[in-house]
Image (cartoon, helix red, strand yellow):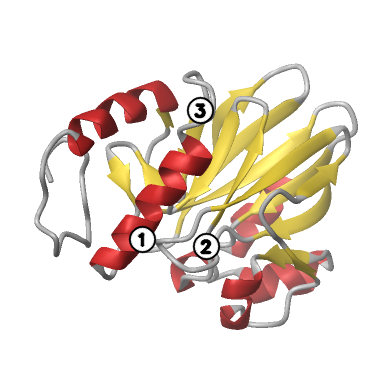
Amino acid sequence: MVLVGKDDNIQVEKLELGPFGTNAYVLVCRATRDSVLVDTPAEADKILERLKGTNPRYILVTHSHSDHLGAFSELKSRLGIPAAIHPLDARSLPSPPEILLNDGDTVSFGKIALKVLHTPGHTPGSVCFLTGQYLLSGDTIFPGGPGRTGSPADLRQVIESITKKIFVLPDDTQVHPGHGESTVLKKEKEEFAAFSSRTHDPGLCGDVLWLSS
């Protein structure tokens, strides 16, 4: 477990789990100890251990790829709390979600409100969660580039999601992605500016980096 964010209202902790080093996040309201879990990669016992001493309210899923869902069924069964995902990714869950998330929705727990940003491209139903200066970005954006895409159309879509939904946020927004380390939005905006100033192969997709693709 790594503490990646903390202020007077919220604590954000990251657990890197499973064979793909997928990040799960535990968000805790400091006033009430209510919590939410963002993504369920693997190793349910480690996640449950971290949730001890909190009041879990929701399982939130950024997107439906299997490396984010390895412990979903076990956690859902043992916690007995609602799961939430965007409708376009809902069919890939092991069991139907109780809540369908749409762009602009708010998920509240304790005194914390999470805003839902629909950011398609990596998957049709990818979402990010925003509260204060903390953005949980799933596989939409990473340090240095967007999430992996399967076609040039998907790359164009994820770039549109990033520019219209994420790059409009303040420069000091902390970005906590679905794999690896965190970043700060100012850095990503600057590197994307370099990317967008160059011409690119119309077939570009896959693992793209702002500075070298």
On screen, residue 73 versus residue 21, left or right, reads: right
Number of other residues with Cα within 10 Å of mark 1, as a class: few under 14, some 14 to 19, many 20 or more: few
Question: Is residue 148 visible to the viewer in this orientation of the structure?
Answer: no
Gap in angstroms between the C-alphas marked 3 and 2:
22 Å
Number of residues whose C-alpha sits closer than 10 Å to that of mark 2, classed few (under 14), some (14–19) or many (20 or more): many
Q: Which residue is mark 1?
A: 20
Q: Which mark is residue 148?
A: none
Q: Which quadrant would the N terminus be assigned to in this image?
A: top right
Which residue lies at the image location 65% right of the left edge and 72% below the top edge?
87
* Quarter-of-image position of residue 100: bottom right
Q: Secondary structure at mark 2?
A: loop
Pointer 2: what residue?
41
* Whether label 1 touches label 2, CB < 8 Å: yes
Label 3 vs 2, first from the N-terminus = 2
Residue type, numbered disc 3: Gln
Label 3 Cα neighbours within 10 Å, binned few <14 / some 14-19 / many ≥20? many
Pick whichever, 26 or 137, lies toward us.
137
Q: Is residue 174 above or below residue 176?
A: above
Q: Give the side of residue 180 with respect to residue 83, left or right.
A: left
Q: Quadrant of residue 92?
A: bottom right
Q: Which is more foreground, mark 3 or mark 1?
A: 3
Asked where in the image residue 44 lies, by quadrant, the reply is: bottom right
Residue 174 image label = 3
Residue 131 percent across, percent down from the top left = 68, 33
Distance CA(mark 1)–CA(mark 2): 9 Å
Residue ID at (48%, 42%): 164
Q: Is residue 51 above or below residue 151?
A: above
Secondary element under disc 3, as helix, strand or loop, is strand
Task: Examine the rendering and report whether any part of residue 43 can be seen.
Answer: yes
